[in-house]
């Protein structure tokens, strides 16, 4: 009974909004407004709340209570034909993409890409990763900055000795060879490697120190989680001279991989007028339950340009950055070249 009452209340709120739009015009178009959901919740929770409200409203409309409350047949039909939140999000994203392709985008990209179907292969994400604001606060409190750049940018160091030495020692001549080397890094969670939820390493620490960590479950191997791999991969691509800072960036956001949602960091590369994602974490990873390293099937066949043609399931974008540029996607803060105002079509 309580569930029915709550559902009815949510439906009444929705119908009141719809009624005010359609009053006097039974054929008016009615759209679902996210303003009905509390602004303070996360995007993922907001989407779930929207879906709950939508489902409750449809159940309400199919009952005779709507007629008792005086809603006309035309108004009820318009509301029943209303698009789901997921469809509206996809339509809005498609419109934004079209504007961007037409040269109309001059601000930071939206942080709500289309949520694609589960992808294969599945990169490793940090499900316990801090949320957007917690991550920013953590880095501000735990990053020793010697410059006036963002704390995120301190972790992309293309000209550090360790990065240049790695390129030389591994004889990495181009982006394909760099990516092949990166895919062999082993994903290990911060909780295993550091005994805490979150800890960022510089590329120097990642490349030179993690093989000798006492906590490294694969002693002698370069290990860490997604942000350390993304920051180091971006550093190698820029430091090699194959790309400059305007064409390589690290992305951080919320992703959905194989039905699981979590925070993640990856790299984007700009070629031929478009961005595409590049992710080192499609390779081996340490599984805490089995206490062994898992080597995904055929991961060695995934090349640098794999995600140019494959979906990459991003739910929200939070930040873009490298050692020179930074964008806070949520606030629209934009200190980057014009090509940074667009995003990959695979999102």
Image (tube, grey):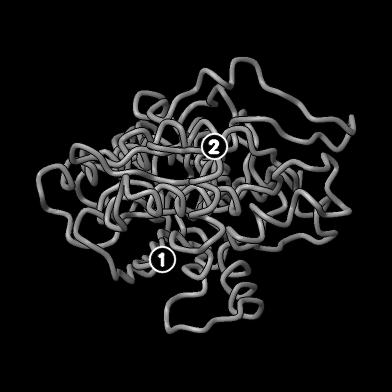
Measuring 21% from the left and 50% from the top, which residue is drawn there?
24
At label 2, counting other C-alpha atoms closer than 10 Å, the crowd grade (few under 14, some 14-19, many 20 or more) is some
User: For the C terminus, which image quadrant?
Assistant: top left
Residue 135 screen position, x and y as percent: 61, 66
Report which residue position mark 2 lands on. 55
Q: Can the viewer see residue 49 in this picture?
A: no
Which mark identifies residue 92?
A: none
User: For the N terminus, which image quadrant?
Assistant: top right
Q: Is residue 129 left or right of residue 116?
A: right
Is residue 182 or residue 1 the one in the foreground?
Answer: 182
Residue 130 screen position, x and y as percent: 66, 61
Q: Is residue 279 left or right of residue 20?
A: right
Is residue 159 or residue 292 the one in the foreground?
Answer: 159
Measuring 57% from the left and 45% from the top, which residue is drawn there?
48
* Disc 1 secondary structure class: loop
Report which residue position mark 1 lands on. 323
Q: Can the viewer see residue 92 in this picture?
A: yes
Mark with earlier residue (1, 2): 2
Question: In which quarter of the view is residue 182 placed?
Answer: top right
At label 1, counting other C-alpha atoms closer than 10 Å, the crowd grade (few under 14, some 14-19, many 20 or more) is many
In the picture shown, does residue 63 fall above or below 201? above
Measuring 38% from the left and 47% from the top, which residue is drawn there?
32
Q: Is residue 43 left or right of residue 29?
A: right
Q: CA distance from mark 1 to mark 2?
A: 46 Å
* Disc 2 secondary structure class: helix
Residue 345 screen position, x and y as percent: 30, 36
Between disc 1 and disc 2, the foreground one is 1
Residue 75 screen position, x and y as percent: 32, 40
């Amino acid at each position: 009974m309580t569930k029915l009452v709550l559902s009815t209340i949510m439906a009444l709120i929705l119908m009141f909004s719809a009624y005010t739009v359609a009053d006097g015009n039974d054929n008016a178009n009615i759209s679902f407004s996210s303003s009905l959901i509390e602004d303070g919740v996360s995007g993922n929770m907001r989407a779930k709340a929207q879906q709950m409200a939508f489902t409750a409203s449809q159940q309400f409309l199919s009952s005779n209570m709507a007629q008792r409350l005086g809603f006309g047949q035309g108004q009820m039909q318009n509301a029943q034909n209303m698009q789901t939140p997921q469809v509206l999000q996809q339509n809005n994203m498609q419109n934004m993409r079209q504007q961007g392709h037409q040269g109309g985008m001059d601000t930071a990209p939206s942080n709500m890409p289309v949520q694609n179907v589960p992808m294969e292969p599945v990169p490793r994400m940090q499900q316990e990763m801090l949320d957007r604001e917690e991550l920013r606060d953590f880095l501000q409190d735990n990053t020793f900055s010697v410059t006036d750049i963002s704390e995120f940018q301190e972790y992309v160091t293309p000209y550090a000795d360790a990065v240049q030495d790695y390129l030389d020692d591994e004889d990495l001549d181009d982006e394909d060879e760099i990516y092949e080397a990166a895919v062999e890094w082993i994903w290990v969670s911060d909780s295993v490697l550091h005994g805490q939820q979150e800890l960022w390493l510089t590329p120097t620490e990642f490349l030179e120190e993690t093989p000798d960590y006492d906590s490294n479950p694969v002693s002698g191997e370069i290990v860490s989680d997604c942000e350390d791999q993304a920051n180091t991969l971006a550093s190698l691509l820029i430091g090699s001279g194959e790309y400059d800072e305007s064409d390589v960036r690290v992305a951080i956001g919320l992703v959905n991989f194989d039905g699981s949602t979590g925070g993640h960091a990856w790299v984007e590369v700009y070629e031929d007028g478009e961005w595409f994602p590049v992710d080192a974490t499609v390779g081996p990873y340490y599984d805490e339950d089995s206490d062994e390293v898992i080597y995904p099937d055929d991961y060695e066949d995934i090349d640098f340009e794999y995600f140019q043609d494959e979906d990459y399931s991003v739910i929200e974008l939070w930040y873009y950055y490298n050692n020179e540029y930074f964008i806070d996607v949520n606030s629209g803060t934009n200190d980057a070249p014009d090509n940074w105002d667009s995003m990959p079509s695979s999102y």
